[in-house]
Image (cartoon, rainbow, N blue to C red):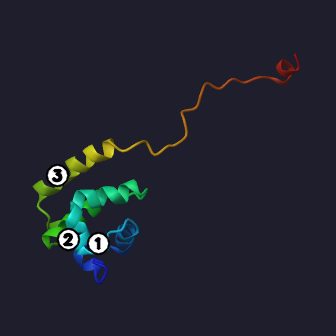
Amino acid sequence: MDAAPKTLGIGGKSAAWLRQVGLRTHEDIAAIGALEAFMRVKRAGFKPSLNLLYALEGVLTGCHWQHVDIARRADLATQAQAAIALLPSPCRMPAASECVTTMGADLAS
């Protein structure tokens, strides 16, 4: 995969994301599958589009992502949406509480 990511439909940025989550070879992706590879990138805080998921499937099936069967892409998209829904909220700050405005005179009393 590292040798020629563009020929597989995976661009340089996506290849860098994959390396950063420990997926460097075709075998690494094959061991966990396209969906889990996509989710690892997502859980790492990157913002991949579904095209990465399709490209990963293409890597596993030996074709460009645009040649992955439309029904398979729809199935992968449905699985990805379900997995993404289970992720914790990216916002780590608690929701804001009610805001109360005070005037300087109120503070003096």
- Residue at left 37%, top 71%? 19
Q: Decide if residue 93 is in sight here.
A: yes
Q: Is residue 17 above or below residue 7?
A: above
Q: Position of residue 48 (x, y in %)?
A: 35, 59
Q: 37 or 12, which is in the foreground?
A: 37
Query: Residue 102 falls in which quadrant of the image?
Result: top right
User: For the point 34% across and 58% down, which residue is it?
Assistant: 40
Is 94 displayed left or right of 37 in the figure?
right
Where is 68 relative to 103, above or below?
Answer: below
Residue named by callout 3: 74
Q: Quadrant of the C terminus?
A: top right
Furthest residue to the right? 108
Say which residue label 2 marks.
59
Whole-percent x, y for residue 45 in the image: 43, 56
Q: Does 51 sit left or right of 61 as displayed?
A: right
Query: Where residue 7 appears, x then y in whole percent?
Result: 24, 79
Residue type at mark 2: give it: Val
Q: Along the line of sight, which residue is nearer the eye, 18 or 13?
A: 18
Type of the residue with mark 3: Ala
Q: Secondary structure at mark 3?
A: helix
First in sequence: mark 3 vs mark 1:
1
Quadrant placement of the N terminus: bottom left
Earlier residue among tags 3 and 2 = 2
Q: Mark 2 or mark 1: which is in front? A: 2
Dots 2 and 1: beta carbons under 8 Å? Answer: yes
Q: Is residue 93 left or right of residue 40?
A: right
